[in-house]
Amino acid sequence: MSLKHIFIFLLFCLTSIQSYAIINIESMRIDSDKKTQGFEGKLAFDISGQNGNSDKFIAGLGGRAQWYLQDGTHFLVANYEYGEFSGTRDTNKTFLHARNINYITQSQAWETFIQLESNEFTRLEQRSLLGAGFRWQILQSDKHASYFGIGIFRSREELDMESLSDQGISYISRLNNYIVYNFAISSHSRLVNTLYYQPNLSDGSDYRLLEQFALQLDITEMLKFKLSINISHDSEAALLTEETDTSYQSGFEYTF
């Protein structure tokens, strides 16, 4: 990996795209047919706005790095998103995730991960978690690919606003289940659907869901365009926040 690659990725980490009750890590993986030793990275940028009866601006920056080893893969993701509505800040969230993948067979792997995130407008001062899981490739062909994962993580969550009864620090253990389906429309376009389900191990009525449907288009070998619809649900959302969030995003990804 060159010094140029290190500098570009660190720049995006320091400026450190999206952050929900659940983070779709599948959308952040770099799938490579090479599976050789070495480094590969992605830079992503989102921007949207509106002027007229209302003024809206939102932008996101993200960096992703992946290191291939003979018996596994490491990757690191750092994202930051900021937005304003009529001159007032209404989006401010950060995210950092590191993952180690150890291959058992070509279609099976163990994974361990750590994660840090914050979101000012869901009152999330900080969430940190440590987890592990097992991942299967359940379908693979020229046009179709599907993966299933199951695991567990332990999280520490800190909510702000001292005047509210749920303010403070909580520790929760959750199952982490997901399924991914990838359909190649052509050699330069694909549809990807991802569903996450994360129930609280001690209270089944406390669960989190994330559904993401995305279209990815290859503009060049290294530049891609992505359009996605994201629906997230938290059955035990923090006070003064909504249980369900829906968002629509578009942006570009550059692979190096």
Image (cartoon, grey):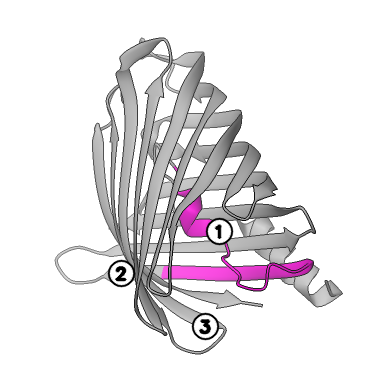
Residue 181: x percent and y percent? 36, 57
Q: Which mark is residue 49?
A: 2
Type of amino acid at the residue the image marks with label 1: Arg
Whether residue 159 can be seen here: no
Comparing labels 3 and 1, the label whose residue is closer to the camera? 1
- Give the quarter of the image for residue 23: top left
| Magenta span includes 26 | yes
The residue drawn where x is 57% and y is 34% is: 133
The one of 189 and 205 positioned closer to us in this rendering: 189
Residue receiving disc 3: 223
The residue drawn where x is 59% and y is 29% is: 129
In the visual, does 111 lie left or right of 197? right
Type of amino acid at the residue the image marks with label 3: Leu
Looking at the figure, which quarter contains the N terminus? bottom right
Comparing labels 3 and 2, the label whose residue is closer to the camera? 3
The residue drawn where x is 41% and y is 84% is: 188
Q: Do the residues labelled 1 and 2 touch (CB within 8 Å)?
A: no
Comparing labels 1 and 2, the label whose residue is closer to the camera? 1
Type of amino acid at the residue the image marks with label 2: Gly
Mark 1 lies on a secondary structure that is loop
The first of marks 1 and 2 along the sequence is 1
Residue situated furthest bottom in the rendering: 220
Residue receiving disc 1: 29
The one of 165 and 236 positioned closer to us in this rendering: 236
The magenta-colored residue range is 23-46
Badge 2 crowding class, 10 Å Cα cut-off, few under 14, some 14 to 19, many 20 or more, is few
Badge 1 crowding class, 10 Å Cα cut-off, few under 14, some 14 to 19, many 20 or more, is some
